[in-house]
């Protein structure tokens, strides 16, 4: 409007307008002054009204020239009024007004209206059309065509041509307009066709044809179709000239459009074919000419167009044409109809009114019946429609989406007519009728959209989608039954830009039609699709998208119940899209997320099968980790054991990068970026176990129930995921067929989901159906009544084996699977596998890969030798191809095929394993019914096992090694070695060294240095290669460098040797040397440039040679890790953002490639790649921080400090090895040095980085590297570098020099003897570092023994003063005080010692309040000091003791309660404390722990409340009563919990003491109904893991500690008690109960009477502490060293409850079984005689007899258990490592504790993972030494246990685990002894019995009355003495004091009475001595025979 107003305001425009209008209305005049200009609209309207009124009259001047001038004026005025053309013209109808004078101009006699006038008129018309299109296309368009028609009929050709040009303008205008324009053109062409069919002159027709041809040359879409249709209609003309002209025009159009004639016509063939074929009888020339133009035969044309023509012909009863077509094609009319019935009937049913439809149907019935031979029986309309009902309905649904509302309405009527034809229940409406067929309809629509039946235009697809939308509305909420199919369609079509808007409209309708609960599954997918495509959507499409999101958030979000609002968590994050801010705000208000829960939701979405959802979720995860919750991630990945969420993130990302298929590249890019943000987390500190859903069919598909279970497994775990994730509709159809058939096989029918169904469903079927997860039910429910069909292609003739003849892995695995399907055994197997034929022949190999192992197993278990041989040939072909030097297969094909074969072999091995486990049980159970079935299974097992045995072990080992299946290779090589060793005698010339070398190489590849170490001990003369492997695996790079240098002297031109040397130089950080070496090598061998580029470029950037870096990276062929990193560095140097982003993107793809190749479980294998991604992210972090530093100095310092903190946390979470840390620190220094501006803060960071490098090099023993880094740090003036310098000097063996240097440096800085230093300006970090230096100095002074204790104390005190609130300072100060106290004499302890104790307790309480690093040292020790002092009279009466009490009492409130909980057993053991004041504080402490953690603490407190000792019991009950009655707790559930748990404990006590008699079982329901009724009582199940504190990894003063879960919030509670209570066979008759936990897992417990379980409970606490210590040490953590613990609850001193360890078996029955198979009896008369001789003989004789007479009779067989139980190689290796390490840990712990009675029934094996589990700890504290036959070995290490360790035996894995464990135990003596301290104050019953025995002896010797007075005191004193004497040997062993003398001279564990021979022994020597004792034949021979030392 503004443009129009501007024009009107222009005086020039006004003047011109006046002139033009005046000329046009002459002789009339217009009073211009009376027309106001202020309102342009009224101004314009007045002018047009005047023109209109003028031309209601005749011309004023009618001469030709006047007419021509007038026409020119009209054209000029049309142009002048152009400003009104866009938005105003149709309002004013300018075109209609201007047509009035034009009509007058061309009316009149020919003398006045000559050809020039007429041409001028048409020229003016063209101007009007061009300048005023809006008017031309208005709802009331001017009669333009009527005017044009005059021109077409003109006798002058030039006029006709001009009219044609105007027509061309008009139709093109309409063609480019909105959809309304198409209707205008339809009308125009109808009139043109009418003209051409009329009797006008041929000249007129000729001009029209030429005009139409010219229009067609540049026409598109519908206009082109109208042109082609019009011209083809002229091919049937009798006039040959017109016919030829039309033909020529068509050819010209085809040429102009650059199409063949057929391609030109094909999009419009449907309408053209009807026109042409329907005239076949009346105008046969038309079809012949048309076919000539198209270059097709008429018969072919007719055949191809039948779907288009037959509907019209049948509907219009064109009987003659139909009969002629039938004759031409040689097909009966019935055949023609049946092939195209749905198209024909769809057309028939769309006719107006029921009469026409009925007439057409009657015609069809008649003509079919007339032509059919034989006559169809009872052929009815209903049957005819029913035969094609789905396709018919689909066709009609498409018409529902027609833009023409009349056509759409006809389709609705048609659907009703169809309904009436099929069913009589028409009053129900369309919805239930369409619901019956909706799956078929939707599938048909999907096929149309996917162009399955021919390509469709976008317009046609839009119509289909609109039709789908109407269908959804018609069916209503029941449409949810086909949700997966509809969602697949919508997602696929949404990705097509042209269809996005209409798709979203349908999507919105779909969501808004569904019930709220049915929308929820699609929330994530919908929001993800919209968010991922947002930037590509047009504004109108974005509005539709908003509508969908608004519906989800506002409508669904406000409707769902509060308990289901969590479903809105599935909505992906779209906070970054400004246009969606209002919706996002609402969403955030509905869902209030805990960050952990938010993260878990994101991870769940990342694992989605839907690519779009996963992609958006990964973007969200990236944003979450990088920006929103970076601190949360930092806290989760901290400490000795990372939060399980870290493992979940890592596992999820690994699964994402290993995904294949469309869109996987984008997913990988995002996942690699997320991996970089998370960092290279230490795999030893996070749990990366993934669940496996494998199934093994045991009965070869002969058991109906098992076969159906397999079908269910495949549906749930394979097919549904594939079905939901694929966007390929055709493949989805194949999968739908497979699922449909399997559902039918499982007897699932629509009766399961139909409320009207009268069919009964069996309980088995219903239970199985209900067992499906929700997402599976949603997917398969619509397929219950489906009628999908599959066409099976015949397989080509296949040679055997198939593998060599296929180019790719996909072709091979699919073809072989399809071939094997035909070989499946008859019956159920063939029925199940047969339905997979179409599903396995697809681009996705997932289904084929999954069913292949099951197929092979089925065929092998069946009796067909040919098929078995074929499978063996196939497997052998794949394995041979791996090792064939001349193989033509691609690396991908070889690797993937080998993996498939190994997966298959693992499956067969697993089958053999489970069958061996199951068959004995089945045989027992079926003896009464005969054992024929068992025999069949046995035969099947033998057949499968023989196939596994027939594969050459050596071939398998080599093939496995070739394709990096190292565990399999190791297993097969070991089998060869074992079989060679077992041969008697060994084969001549058998040298094991090559095998040992190969095993050493495999262990190196597996990154198992312990295994390598073990193999090294077997190789007497190691090769240079062996030494290199050994050095490199253990990080001894200097030694490895020397070896490589020797090799290069031998072969200077060997590239591999140079690469090895360069690797060493890089890992040592010697980049100058590396660069020089590379340059020298390249001079001699320039062809090695690409191979050495990585080393070359890294050394160049390390020394700052950026020109060299640029020249190396310029070669685009170089794509190694270092090269892509160098490109990132160069981009960051340049500062160009686009270049940086592209280099980062490319780098991530290259560096992450090994991760994608390693698979979901390849975290360790791909760790180097993770380090690279970690590094790349840090480059980005540093660059972003440095390039955007604030201008202020303080701001810069703060920004760099924040960055430093982030980088430090990232480094801490990586694997703590020199190689990893140094590579990261080195890259950081490079990144910081890229900054062009020198900043002190950046220089400081570089200095700190050098310090960190010096530290890790020192710890790794790399002295030279550490020294170099130290010098660099000093060069950059790094603060506090003197500390690291001192540590380095000390580490190199000069402690005094180190102390001197440290002290001197600190004096220079004023840190020593300078009390006047002002610390106000120092930041916290500086204060902390100063305190660290002071602690270091004080500790070194203390260790040097050269300083007065008071001086050292002062240094410790200075540290505490320097950094108040720092845990370490307080701990070390307190520890020093405690050390001084321990060194005091007994007299001094009771005087000076009290003050020291006071200081120690004060320091330890401060330390515990400020941190948790030393919790296990401070809490137990301060408790011991405080409570011991309270028990002794002299200290307790000292005034200082009151202060101590006050300190402890206040610390109960200041120290977080969970820290007290760590010592709760110790606290509880002191509840009988005699000092009343102490007890008051103690009871307050106990109360606070129980109040804070009642679920856990009350289990520990059970033994007190039910104690047999009155004092303990009374005090325990008082504490609980006070807690229950406290006003603070009255409103909470706390009192109820105490009551409930107490009731449960009482019932458990009753169960323990219940009289059994001869009963074998008890009934919970009958005998313990109260206990049974305690289900779902929210009481915690007392598992060891649930009762163990998880300390926060960071300081407790920060906010992070409050977010930490001290106990797992998901710890299970009791939900169900099982009725049956099993009575065990042992003497005490323990009772086994079974419960279900809230986590769905079944737990079992033994209720043990007459057993003091306090010993077991404390031992579990002891082991729990050890497990925590093992996790803190990087070496033990890397080896996953641990002790298997289980829950123990002592209910009182006489009975308790102990957790049953599931999936375990004692060693003894395992060994007996293998000896039985070898016919070796467990005991014999000969063995009895030999053991008697050994007992009476000397050690020497015993050893000889044992070795020569006993051991040969019992060859070691234990290795067989591992092979048989874990036949899958990777599981076999892991289980054996678990076995060796758990046995080693428990051996060391058992030695320390004096654990005896380790016979083979007390050592259990976990059949799931190989762990060793020790039970029955009765023989503790060296009790075994006091038996009638004293135990002489420190732990069990008999020949079979050694055999289980593999070829290496005790060397390697076992020995190293022993040494690490022993060192750890010795380093942590104090916290371990503090756990055992409870034994002193709460002695065991057996010790009390021993004390009573002594008292009885005393009573016999002394006066009884006198003795009675002192008995209590004597008893207490004796008990304490007894306990201390039992624990003293443990303390000595922990100090390393041990005397390996003969057992007869030993007391406790080798500690002599006088101690004259005891000496401190190094850890490695002690381990060696213990192993020697354990395997010493004399010791083993002298063991009690029942211990079975030969086993």
Image: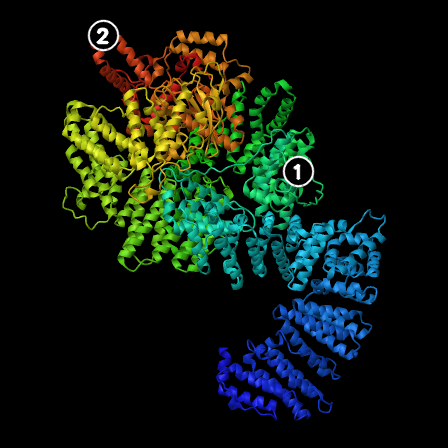
Looking at the rendered image, the disc whose residue lies closer to the viewer, 1 or 2, is 1
Q: Name the image quarter holding residue 760.
A: top right
- Where does residue 1660 sit, x and y in percent of width and height? 37, 26
Q: Name the image quarter holding residue 741.
A: top right
- Where does residue 755 sit, x and y in percent of width and height? 62, 42
The disc, 1 or 2, on the residue closer to the chain's N-terminal end is: 1
- Tally the marks: 2
Residue in the foreground of this view, choosing between 1649 and 1314: 1649
Residue of label 1: 759
The answer to whether any part of residue 250 appears in the image is yes
The answer to whether any part of residue 1118 appears in the image is no
Q: Secondary structure at mark 1?
A: loop
Indicate how the structure is coloured in the image: rainbow
**Image marks 1 and 2: residues in contact by CB distance under 8 Å:** no
- Where does residue 63 sit, x and y in percent of width and height? 68, 93
Q: Name the image quarter holding residue 913.
A: top right
Disc 1 to disc 2, C-alpha distance: 88 Å
Residue in the foreground of this view, choosing between 1278 and 1725: 1725
**Eyeballing the image, is 299 above or below 1865?**
below
**Eyeballing the image, is 209 above or below 397?**
below
**Eyeballing the image, is 1748 above or below 1419?**
above
Residue in the foreground of this view, choosing between 1071 and 908: 908
Q: Would residue 1931 be found to the left or right of residue 772 on screen?
A: left
């Amino acid at each position: 409007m503004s443009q129009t107003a501007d024009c009107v305001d222009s005086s020039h425009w006004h003047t011109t307008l006046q002139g033009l209008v005046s000329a046009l209305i002459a002789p009339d005049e217009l009073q211009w002054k009376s027309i106001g200009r202020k309102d342009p609209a009224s101004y314009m309207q007045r002018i047009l009204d005047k023109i209109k009124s003028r031309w209601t009259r005749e011309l004023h001047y009618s001469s030709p020239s006047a007419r021509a001038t007038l026409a020119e004026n009209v054209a000029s005025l049309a142009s002048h009024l152009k400003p009104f053309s866009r938005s105003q013209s149709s309002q004013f109808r300018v075109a209609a007004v201007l047509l009035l004078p034009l009509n007058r101009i061309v009316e009149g006699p020919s003398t006045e209206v000559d050809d020039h006038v007429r041409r001028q008129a048409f020229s003016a018309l063209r101007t009007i059309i061009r300048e005023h299109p809006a008017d031309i296309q208005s709802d009331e368009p001017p009669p333009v065509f009527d005017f044009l028609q005059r021109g077409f009929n003109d006798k002058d050709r030039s006029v006709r041509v001009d009219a044609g040009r105007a027509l061309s303008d008009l139709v093109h205008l309409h063609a480019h307009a909105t959809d309304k324009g198409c209707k205008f053109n339809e009308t125009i062409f109808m009139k043109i066709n009418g003209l051409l069919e009329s009797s006008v002159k041929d000249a007129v027709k000729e001009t029209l044809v030429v005009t139409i041809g010219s229009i067609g040359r540049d026409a598109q879409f519908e206009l082109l179709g109208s042109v082609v249709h019009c011209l083809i209609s002229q091919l049937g003309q009798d006039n040959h000239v017109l016919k030829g002209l039309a033909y020529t025009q068509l050819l010209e159009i085809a040429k102009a459009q650059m199409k063949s004639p057929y391609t030109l016509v094909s999009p419009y063939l449907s309408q053209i074919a009807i026109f042409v074929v329907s005239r076949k009888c009346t105008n046969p020339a038309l079809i012949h000419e048309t076919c000539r133009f198209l270059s097709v035969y008429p018969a072919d044309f007719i055949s191809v167009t039948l779907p288009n023509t037959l509907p019209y012909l049948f509907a219009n009863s064109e009987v003659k044409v139909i009969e002629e077509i039938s004759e031409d094609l040689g097909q009966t009319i019935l055949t023609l109809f049946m092939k195209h019935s749905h198209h024909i009937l769809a057309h028939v049913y769309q006719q107006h009114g029921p009469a026409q439809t009925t007439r057409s149907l009657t015609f069809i019935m008649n003509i079919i019946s007339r032509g059919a031979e034989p006559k169809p029986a009872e052929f009815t309309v209903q049957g005819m429609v029913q035969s094609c009902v789905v396709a018919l309905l689909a066709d009609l649904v498409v018409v529902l989406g027609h833009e023409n509302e009349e056509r759409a309405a006809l389709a609705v009527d048609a659907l009703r007519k169809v309904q009436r034809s099929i069913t009589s229940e028409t009053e129900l409406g369309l919805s239930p009728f369409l619901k019956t067929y909706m799956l078929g309809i939707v599938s048909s629509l999907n096929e149309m959209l996917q162009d399955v039946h021919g390509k469709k235009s976008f317009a046609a697809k839009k119509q289909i989608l609109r039709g789908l939308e109407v269908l959804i509305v018609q069916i209503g909420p029941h449409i949810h039954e086909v949700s997966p199919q509809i969602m697949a369609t919508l997602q696929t079509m949404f990705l097509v830009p042209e269809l996005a808007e209409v798709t979203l409209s349908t999507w919105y309708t779909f969501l808004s039609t569904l019930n709220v609960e049915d929308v929820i599954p699609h929330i994530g997918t919908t929001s993800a699709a919209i968010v991922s495509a947002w930037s590509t959507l047009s504004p109108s499409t974005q509005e539709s998208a908003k509508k969908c999101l608004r519906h989800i958030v506002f409508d669904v979000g406000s409707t769902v119940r509060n308990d289901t609002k969590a479903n809105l968590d599935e909505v992906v994050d779209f906070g970054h899209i400004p246009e969606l801010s209002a919706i996002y705000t609402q969403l955030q208000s509905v869902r209030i997320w805990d960050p952990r829960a938010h993260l878990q939701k994101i991870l769940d979405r990342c694992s989605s099968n839907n690519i779009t959802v996963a992609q958006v979720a990964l973007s969200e995860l990236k944003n979450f980790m990088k920006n929103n919750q970076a601190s949360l991630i930092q806290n989760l990945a901290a400490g000795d054991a990372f939060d399980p969420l870290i493992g979940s993130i890592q596992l999820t990302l690994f699964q994402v990068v290993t995904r294949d298929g469309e869109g996987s590249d984008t997913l990988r890019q995002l996942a690699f970026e997320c991996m970089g943000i998370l960092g290279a987390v230490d795999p030893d500190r996070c749990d990366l176990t993934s669940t496996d859903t494998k199934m093994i069919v045991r009965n070869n598909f002969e058991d109906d129930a098992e076969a159906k279970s397999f079908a269910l497994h495949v549906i749930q775990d394979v097919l549904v995921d594939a079905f939901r994730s694929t966007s390929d509709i055709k493949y989805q159809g194949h999968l739908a067929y497979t699922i449909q058939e399997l559902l039918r096989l499982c007897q699932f029918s629509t009766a399961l989901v139909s409320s009207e169904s009268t069919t009964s469903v069996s309980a088995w079927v219903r239970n199985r159906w209900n067992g499906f997860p929700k997402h599976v039910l949603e997917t398969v429910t619509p397929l219950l009544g489906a009628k999908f069909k599959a066409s099976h292609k015949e397989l080509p003739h296949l040679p055997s084996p198939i593998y060599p003849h296929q180019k790719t892995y996909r072709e091979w695995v699919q073809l072989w699977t399809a071939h094997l399907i035909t070989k499946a055994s008859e019956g159920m197997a063939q029925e199940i596998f047969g339905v997979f034929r179409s599903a396995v022949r697809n681009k996705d190999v997932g289904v084929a890969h999954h069913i292949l192992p099951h197929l092979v197993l089925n065929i092998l278990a069946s009796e067909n030798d040919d098929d078995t041989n074929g499978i063996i040939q196939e497997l052998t072909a794949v394995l041979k191809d791996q090792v064939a030097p001349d193989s033509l297969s691609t690396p991908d094909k070889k690797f993937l095929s080998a993996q498939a074969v190994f997966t298959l072999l693992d499956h067969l091995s697993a089958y053999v394993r489970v069958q061996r486990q199951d068959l004995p049980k089945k045989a027992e159970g079926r003896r009464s019914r005969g054992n024929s079935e068992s025999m069949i299974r046995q035969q099947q097992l033998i057949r499968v096992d023989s196939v596994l045995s027939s594969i050459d072990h050596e071939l398998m080992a080599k093939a496995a090694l070739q394709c990096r299946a190292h565990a399999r290779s190791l297993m097969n090589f070991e089998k060869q070695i074992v079989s060679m060793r077992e041969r008697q005698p060994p084969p001549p010339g058998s040298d094991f060294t090559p095998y040992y070398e190969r095993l050493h190489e495999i262990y190196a590849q597996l990154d198992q240095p312990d295994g390598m170490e073990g193999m090294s001990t077997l190789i007497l003369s190691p090769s240079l290669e062996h030494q290199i492997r050994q050095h490199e695996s253990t990080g001894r790079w200097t030694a490895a460098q020397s070896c490589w240098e020797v090799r290069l002297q031998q072969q200077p031109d060997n590239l591999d040797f140079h690469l090895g040397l360069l690797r060493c130089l890089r890992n040592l950080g010697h980049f100058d040397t590396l660069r020089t070496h590379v340059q020298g090598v390249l001079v001699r061998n320039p062809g090695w440039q690409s191979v050495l580029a990585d080393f070359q470029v890294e050394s160049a950037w390390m020394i700052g040679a950026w020109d060299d870096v640029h020249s190396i990276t310029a070669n685009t062929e170089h794509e190694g890790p270092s090269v892509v990193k160098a490109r990132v560095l160069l981009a960051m140097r340049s500062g160009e953002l686009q270049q940086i982003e592209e280099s980062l993107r490319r780098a991530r793809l290259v560096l992450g490639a090994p991760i994608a190749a390693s698979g979901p479980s390849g975290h360790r294998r791909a760790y180097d790649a993770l380090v690279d991604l970690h590094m790349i992210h840090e480059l980005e972090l540093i660059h972003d921080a440095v390039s955007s530093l604030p201008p202020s100095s303080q701001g810069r310092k703060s920004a760099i400090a924040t960055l430093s903190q982030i980088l430090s946390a990232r480094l801490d979470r990586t694997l703590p090895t020199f190689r990893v840390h140094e590579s990261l620190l080195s890259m950081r220094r490079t990144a910081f040095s890229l900054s062009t501006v020198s900043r002190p803060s950046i220089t400081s960071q570089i200095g700190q980085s050098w310090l960190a490098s010096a530290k890790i090099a020192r710890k790794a023993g790399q002295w030279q590297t550490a020294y170099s880094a130290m010098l660099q740090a000093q060069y950059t003036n790094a603060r506090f570098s003197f500390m690291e310098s001192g540590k380095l000097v000390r580490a190199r063996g000069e402690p005094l020099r180190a102390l001197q240097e440290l002290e001197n440096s600190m004096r220079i800085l004023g840190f020593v003897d300078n009390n006047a230093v002002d610390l106000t300006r120092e930041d916290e970090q500086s204060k902390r570092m100063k305190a660290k230096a002071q602690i270091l100095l004080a500790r070194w002074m203390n260790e040097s023994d050269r300083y007065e204790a008071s001086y050292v104390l002062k240094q410790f005190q200075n540290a505490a003063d320097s950094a108040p609130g720092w845990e370490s300072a307080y701990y070390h100060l307190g520890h020093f005080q405690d050390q001084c106290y321990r060194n005091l004499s007994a007299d001094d302890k009771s005087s000076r010692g009290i003050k020291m104790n006071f200081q120690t307790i004060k320091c330890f309480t401060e330390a515990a309040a400020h941190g948790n690093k030393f919790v296990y040292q401070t809490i137990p020790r301060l408790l011991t000091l405080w409570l011991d002092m309270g028990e002794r009279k002299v200290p307790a009466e000292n005034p200082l003791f009151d202060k101590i009490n006050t300190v402890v009492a206040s610390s109960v409130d200041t120290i977080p309660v969970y820290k007290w909980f760590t010592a709760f057993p110790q606290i509880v053991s002191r509840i009988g404390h005699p000092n009343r004041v102490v007890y008051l504080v103690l009871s307050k402490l106990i109360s606070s722990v129980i109040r804070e953690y009642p679920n856990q603490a009350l289990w520990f407190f059970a033994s007190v409340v039910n104690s047999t000792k009155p004092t303990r019991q009374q005090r325990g009950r008082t504490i609980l009563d006070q807690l229950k009655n406290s006003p603070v707790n009255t409103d909470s559930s706390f009192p109820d919990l105490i009551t409930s748990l107490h009731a449960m404990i009482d019932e458990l006590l009753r169960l323990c003491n219940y009289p059994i008699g001869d009963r074998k079982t008890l009934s919970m329901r009958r005998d313990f109904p109260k206990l049974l009724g305690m289900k779902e009582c929210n009481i915690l199940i007392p598992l060891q893991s649930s009762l163990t504190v998880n300390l926060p990894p960071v300081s407790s003063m920060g906010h992070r500690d409050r977010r930490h879960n001290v106990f797992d919030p998901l710890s299970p509670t009791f939900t169900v008690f099982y009725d049956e209570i099993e009575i065990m066979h042992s003497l005490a008759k323990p009772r086994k109960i079974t419960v279900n936990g809230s986590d769905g897992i079944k737990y079992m417990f033994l209720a043990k009477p007459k057993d003091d379980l306090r010993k077991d409970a404390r031992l579990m606490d002891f082991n729990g502490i050890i497990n925590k210590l093992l996790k803190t040490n990087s070496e033990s953590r890397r080896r996953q060293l641990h002790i298997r613990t289980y829950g123990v609850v002592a209910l009182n001193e006489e009975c308790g409850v102990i957790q049953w360890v599931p999936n375990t078996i004692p060693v003894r029955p395992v060994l007996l079984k293998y000896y039985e198979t070898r016919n070796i009896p467990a005991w014999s008369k000969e063995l009895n005689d030999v053991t008697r001789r050994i007992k009476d003989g000397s050690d020497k004789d015993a050893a000889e007899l044992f070795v020569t007479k006993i051991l040969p009779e019992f060859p070691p067989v234990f290795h067989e258990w591992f092979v048989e139980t874990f036949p899958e190689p990777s599981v076999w290796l892991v289980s054996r490592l678990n076995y060796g390490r758990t046995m080693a840990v428990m051996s060391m712990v058992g030695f320390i504790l004096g654990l005896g009675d380790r016979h083979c029934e007390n050592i259990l094996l976990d059949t799931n993972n190989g762990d060793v589990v020790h039970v029955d700890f009765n023989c503790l504290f060296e009790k075994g030494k006091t038996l009638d036959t004293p135990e002489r070995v420190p732990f069990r290490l008999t020949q079979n246990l050694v055999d289980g360790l593999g070829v290496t035996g005790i060397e390697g894995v076992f020995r190293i685990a022993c040494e690490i464990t022993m060192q750890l135990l010795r380093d942590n003596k104090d916290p371990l002894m503090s756990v055992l301290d409870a034994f002193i104050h709460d002695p065991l019953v057996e010790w009390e019995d021993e004390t009573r025995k002594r008292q009885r002896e005393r009573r016999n010797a002394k006066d009884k009355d006198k003795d009675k007075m002192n008995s209590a005191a004597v008893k207490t004193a004796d008990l304490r003495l007894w306990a201390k004497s039992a624990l003293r040997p443990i303390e000595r062993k922990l100090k390393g004091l041990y005397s390996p003398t003969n057992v007869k001279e030993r007391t406790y564990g080798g500690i002599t009475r006088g101690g004259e021979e005891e000496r401190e022994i190094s850890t490695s020597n002690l381990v060696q001595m213990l192993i020697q004792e354990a395997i010493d034949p004399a010791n083993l021979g002298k063991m009690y025979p029942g211990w079975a030392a030969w086993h």
